[in-house]
Each structure stands twice: as structure tokens, then as C-alpha cells.
Image (cartoon, rainbow, N blue to C red):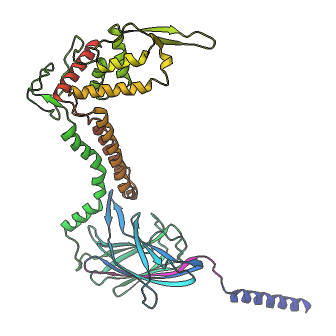
Amino acid sequence: MKRFILAGLFFFLSAGLVQGAEMIPVDRSIEEITRFESHITINQDTSLSIEETINYFTPVDKHGIYRYIPEKYRREGLVYSNPISEISVTDTEGNPMPFSTTREKGNLTLKIGDPNKTFAGRRIYSISYKVGHAILRQKDFDELYWDITGEGWQFPVLSSTVTIRSPFAAGGETICFVGPVGSVSSDCTISRKDKLIKVETREEINYGDNFTVAVKLNQQNSLIFPTATEKLIDLIKNNLFLALTVVPGLLMFFVWYKKGRDFRFVSPNVFNLDTDQPKGLRPLFEPINTLMVYEPLKDLTPGEAGAMLDEKVDNQDVVAEIIDLARKKYLGIERVEKKGFLKFGHDYLLTKFKDGPGDLPPQQKYLMEHIFNSKTSVKLNELKGTFYIHMTKVKEIINDRLREQKLFTSNPNNTRGIWFIATVLMCCAVFATTINTMAFLETIWTFAIFLVSAVTAIIFAWNMPQKTAVGTNLALQVRGLRETIR
């Protein structure tokens, strides 16, 4: 008997505890959407009229929510769009609520809430908007394919429902996808009544998940689709960034074609230096014939000849001028071994033989004055750290000489530098303008097109120094002399 009493008491207490547990209210202390309801009407012009009711809860003070509405999508390597318009946000009583819009990553983002007010607890948002060109025409059927809840929610959506009304096209097979992008999970309930289709999820939608519905529509319908011309215009507008990616290369080609091509004499004689002879810009695909030249050029110093070859004045050209002074017996160059404790290797001793007469070109006069100063000899190692200033000056003199002899239409170093900087800035501006769309496409070929365009633009910028007809012939003579020496 005692055993039965104890068993009954245990049963009574257990039932009481369970009942008490059921009576304790569930305290959800996390941010969430308790219910997301969407009502979609398919209009005759293939647009959608969408009304959404979002039941939102926050345990901490917030200004409002963000609603991410898909506006652009990828297909076959191109961007297509469903333009969003007629946006309205109200509370349950129809009072307007403040919001602002931005566009990023293919979404139209609604920032809903008063920036000067916060709230905690529950709030209901009523959002309505229109989506253009939302019905896809397939081979055997028309299709509504729409992301109901959209991406970007940082908290769970506990329950989601969509009701689809299609007065101008009979709805057929309907499927849903719940989960991350690419998921084939269809954990939802689908019901039909008259021309209404209702789809409800059976699971929460967590961060990174989507709730997408696809409805087949009978092609025997009264929907009015955009014309082929309208579709083409929209396609071009949505993919204008592709044209921007090739702008650097095309623009710099046009600039080079007009301002960077070398002049040349009509006569094929490369030894012709008569500026009065007929001349014109070099044709685009004209071959360059290199003739053998068997004696040094009288019209150019070695440094100037080097500048004509690569269209820039560099340190090698200055060294060539020093070696030419040695050839003319104005100075001597002797290799000497370094002597002393912990001194290894060799150095070069420059010895002045005579002062430069007035017939030396200005860059060689300058070198004679500043290599030795008041000395008769100097080691190359002694010039380190100080002579670079004079190297720069010699380069400027050579550039001036090329301009005075009218071998280039402008200073080649300055021309190349200006166009190179301008091209790099242009490429950066184009990249900054198109990076979001290129990233949205998630394909490598758009980046490859831009890279080819940018490299092409830089190549043309590098070749912007323009030779005169005399400069072209002298450059051909220098090239011929180089081939002979080889």
C-alpha cells in the first residue's frame, strides 16, 4: 500500500512539473522576424506588384531594419535586371515610415527607420513595390522565378509565406527552394485555390539562406512581354560596364593614332634629312626595313643615338657620352684594383687629357666641367652620391638637343611621363567604376578583358613620343648601325 502511495505522489509531482513548465512563457531574447508574408500579383505587362508584411522583434534598441530586394541577376555571363519602382513603407495603420535606398551587389537596399529614434520589442512593417520584367519566357512555358525573402538578413526568419495571384496566366507546376544559394531543398507546403498559389516554408530561414519560388505559367495567356528592341536596350544599359572595361585600350589607341604615330618622308631613302621633302604620318601596318649602316652618324652623339632607339634618355646614354669623350681623346678610362685593408674589387680612374674646345656638344662640355672640376683625375667611386645631380642635368641637355634638332615633336621623356600617369589614373577610375559589377558577375573573363585593355593602354602611352620625319630617318640609321655592329 505504501508503495502505491509513493508511486501516485511521484506521478502527481511529475505531472505538476510538466504542466508548470508548459505554463512558463518562452522568452525569446534574440533579434528575429517572427513572420514574413508576401503577396504577389502578376500584372499583364509581366511586372509584379508585391506587398510584404514583416513582423520584426528586437530585444535591444534599434532604429529599424534593412530590406534587401534582388534587382539584378546573372545569366550566361551577362547582367539582367528587374527594375524596382513605386516603393512604399508604412506601419500597420498605413502611416508612412522613413526609409532610404541604396544599390549594391545586385540588390536594392531599403534602410527603414527613423535615424533619430530607437525602439525595442515588436514592430510590423508593410512594404510594397513593383518589379519590372519579372516573367521569363522559356521554350515551352513562361516562368515566375522570385526570391521571396531576399538575402542579407542577419537574424532568422521563423516563418515565411507567399501568396501568388496570376489573373492573366494560368499557374501550373510550382516548386520552392529553401536554404543557401544553389540549394535544392524543398521543405515547404504548396496549395492552390482558384487563381491563387500559396507557398509556406516548414523551416526557419537563417543567415545566408533564401526562400525562392518558381511557378510555371501556361503560354496560352494574355501577358504582354517587352519587345525585342526593348529587351536589347535594357541589355545594353545593364552591361554598359563591359564597354567601360575596353575604354582605356581603345581611347589610348585613338590618341596614339592621332598624336603618337611617327612622321616619315614619302621617299624611302633613310638618309634623306631634307625637311622640305613631302612627309606624312606612318601608316598603321607599314613594315620597317632596316638598312645596314657602316659608319658612325655625324648628326648624332652616342647618347642622342641611344635616345632615338628607345625614345627616352637614360643613364646608359650619359655613359655613352663619357665613352665618346674617351674615343675623342679628351679623357682616359683606366681600370684599377682597389688597395688597402678589406678593400676588394676594382675601380675606374678617369684622367683628363685636355679641356673641351668649343666644338664639343653641350652635354659633353658639361661632363668635362663637372667630372673633374679642378682636378686632372678622379676615381669613379669618388663620384658616387654626388654626381647623380649632374647625370640629371646631362639628360636634360640631351633632351633639349633632340628638341632643338626637331627630332621629336615634344620632349619624349615628358610626353611619356604625362601620358603614362594619365593612363594609369584613367585605368584606376574605370576599375573603381566597374569593380562592383565585375565582382557581381563572378566570372574571370570580365577582369581579363579589363586587364588586356589596361595593358594595351599603357603600351600606347609608353609609345606616345612622336618622332619627326628627320627623327624617323635618323632612328632608322641608328638601328642600321646597331645591326652592322652586331
Q: Is residue 423 left or right of residue 150?
A: left
**In the image: residue 359, left or right of residue 33:** left
- Classified by dominant secondary structure, the portion drawn in magenta counts as strand
Quadrant in the rendering for residue 284: top left
Identify the residue at image location x=31%, y=56%: 241
In the image, is residue 249 above or below residue 24? above
Residue 86 visible in the current orientation: yes
Residue 57 on image: x %, y %? 56, 81
Q: Is residue 40 magenta?
A: yes
Would you say residue 313 is visible in this rendering? no
Q: Residue at x 48, y 69 (%)?
A: 152
- What residue is at 50 percent from the left and 71 percent from the top? 153
Task: Classify residue 395 by image quadrant.
Answer: top left
Residue furthest front as drawn: 374
| Quarter of the figure with the N terminus | bottom right
When asked about the image quadrant of residue 162, the answer is bottom left
**x%, y% of residue 299?**
22, 18
Query: In this rendering, is residue 261 above or below 39?
Result: above
> In the drawing, does residue 8 fall left or right of residue 126?
right
Q: Is residue 376 above or below residue 396?
A: above
Q: How many badges with numbers are in the image?
A: 0
Q: Nearer the viewer, residue 473 or 410?
A: 410
Q: Is residue 305 magenta?
A: no
Q: Position of residue 274 (x, y in %)?
A: 11, 23
Query: Residue 433: image x %, image y %?
Result: 35, 56
User: Closer to the camera, 274 or 224?
Assistant: 274
279 or 241, nearer to the observer: 279
Q: Which residues are magenta?
A: 27-44
Rendered-image quadrant of the C terminus = top left
Work out whether residue 198 or residue 156 is closer to the camera in this orientation and state it. Answer: 156
